[in-house]
């Protein structure tokens, strides 16, 4: 008996298709709700920050999303005095 003769392996995975259909319907509802929402740009900014954080995590890096957001907006972050280099040191 060949592996392709087994009906349970050749039938489409109906539960997977149903789950994908529900997920796509959820995304469509979310997209429709956010289309004209006054805070849609804030939602998108937050989603993008989370996507960057996840991608950095997949690459083995750890970032603070709100620190990244502050840098993107041009906010100069203060550094603790004990983390600064002495003014005469090089390197």
Image (cartoon, helix red, strand yellow):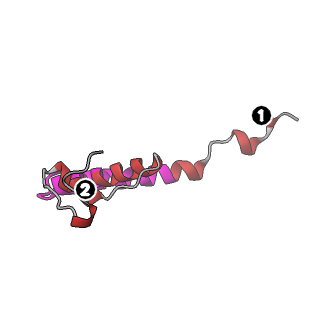
Horizontally, residue 20 falls left or right of residue 16, namely left
Q: Report crowding for label 2: few under 14, some 14 to 19, many 20 or more residues within 10 A (C-alpha).
A: few
Residue found at the far right of this picture: 1
The residue indicated by pointer 2 is: 85
42 over 9 or under it: above or below: below
Q: Report crowding for label 1: few under 14, some 14 to 19, many 20 or more residues within 10 A (C-alpha).
A: few
Horizontally, residue 21 falls left or right of residue 10, namely left
User: SS for tag 2?
Assistant: loop
Residue 37 lies in the magenta-colored region: yes
Q: Position of residue 82 (x, y in %)?
A: 26, 66
Q: Position of residue 21 (x, y in %)?
A: 45, 50
41 over 79 or under it: above or below: above
66 over 20 or under it: above or below: below
The residue indicated by pointer 1 is: 4
For the point 35% across and 50% down, the residue is 51
User: SS for tag 1?
Assistant: helix
Task: Judge whether residue 34 can be spotted in this image.
Answer: no
For the point 51% across and 52% down, the residue is 18
Residue nearest the observer in this picture, 5 or 91:
91
Horizontally, residue 74 falls left or right of residue 44, namely left
Query: Which stretch is magenta?
Result: 19-48
């Amino acid at each position: 008996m060949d592996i392709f003769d087994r009906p349970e392996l050749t039938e489409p995975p109906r539960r997977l298709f149903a789950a994908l259909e529900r997920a796509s319907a959820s995304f469509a509802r979310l997209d429709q709700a956010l289309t004209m929402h006054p805070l849609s740009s804030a939602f998108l900014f937050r989603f993008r920050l989370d996507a960057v954080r996840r991608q950095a995590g997949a690459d083995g890096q750890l970032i603070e999303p709100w620190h990244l957001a502050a840098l993107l907006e041009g906010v100069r972050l203060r550094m603790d005095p004990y983390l600064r280099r002495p003014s005469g040191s090089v390197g």
